Image (cartoon, grey):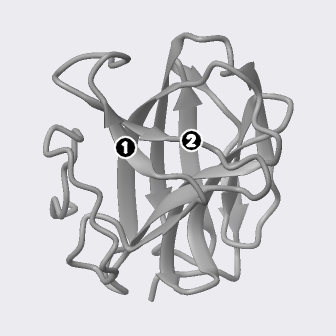
């Protein structure tokens, strides 16, 4: 059974960018400020707001410890327009440049998932329609074939796999 390492509902309204496995976020890449929106939120007091710069992809990432071979995540996404560049919304990485779980919103407004350097799997579901969309994922990086099982709004998507990237 995996050990719970972090739970974050953004209620703290703190965007820590100090890096490392003990921080809220290991990396924030965006030319615009990271803020917390208390108007557009699904539940609770606030939602994390990332405004795309229009020139470069933006993302918030978390560095995972080498011993964390199973990652389970769930987030709600609210987007009003297609990004001008493909924008990474999930980036769980072991070391800089070595992503274990990668999820982008494309310029067409659809989600796509990739496990390490494996084949990119597209959802075909447009998420830039000013509605909340639920993204759930389960990354198992422990075996010879690393696998990400994921759903969008409860609909199972094609697993993303890799035989070369690992968290150990």
The answer to whether marks 1 and 2 mark residues whose Cβ atoms lie closer than 8 Å is yes
Residue 3, horizontal then vertical, whole percent: 16, 64
**Which quadrant would the C terminus be assigned to in this image?**
bottom left
Q: Residue at x 59, y 11 (%)?
A: 130
Residue 32, horizontal then vertical, whole percent: 55, 52
Q: Secondary structure at mark 1?
A: strand
Q: Residue at x 70, y 76 (%)?
A: 163
Observer-nearest of 32 and 115: 32
Q: Which residue is mark 2?
A: 51
Q: Which residue is mark 1?
A: 35
> Is residue 83 shown left or right of residue 80?
right
**Which quadrant would the N terminus be assigned to in this image?**
bottom left
Mark earlier in primary sequence (1, 2): 1
Q: Secondary structure at mark 2?
A: loop
Q: Residue at x 34, y 66 (%)?
A: 25
| Disc 1 residue crowd, few under 14, some 14–19, many 20+, Cα 10 Å | some
Observer-nearest of 69 and 8: 8
Residue 151, horizontal then vertical, whole percent: 55, 30
| Disc 2 residue crowd, few under 14, some 14–19, many 20+, Cα 10 Å | some
Could you say which quadrant of the image residue 39 lies in? top left
Residue 29, horizontal then vertical, whole percent: 56, 65
């Amino acid at each position: 059974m995996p050990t719970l390492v972090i739970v974050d509902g953004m209620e703290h309204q703190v965007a820590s960018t100090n890096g490392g496995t003990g921080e809220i976020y290991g990396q924030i890449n965006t030319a615009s400020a990271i803020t917390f929106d208390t108007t557009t939120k699904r539940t609770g007091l606030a939602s994390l707001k990332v405004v795309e710069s229009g020139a470069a992809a933006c993302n918030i990432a978390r560095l995972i410890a080498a011993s964390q071979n199973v990652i389970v995540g769930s987030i709600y996404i609210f987007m009003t327009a297609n990004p001008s560049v493909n924008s990474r919304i999930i980036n769980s990485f072991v070391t800089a440049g070595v992503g274990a779980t990668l999820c982008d919103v494309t310029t067409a407004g659809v989600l796509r998932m990739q496990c390490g350097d494996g084949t990119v799997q597209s959802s075909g579901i447009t998420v830039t329609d000013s509605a909340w969309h639920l993204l759930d994922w389960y990354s198992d990086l422990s075996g010879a074939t690393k696998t990400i099982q994921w759903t969008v709004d409860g609909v199972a998507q094609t697993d993303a796999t890799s035989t070369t990237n690992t968290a150990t």
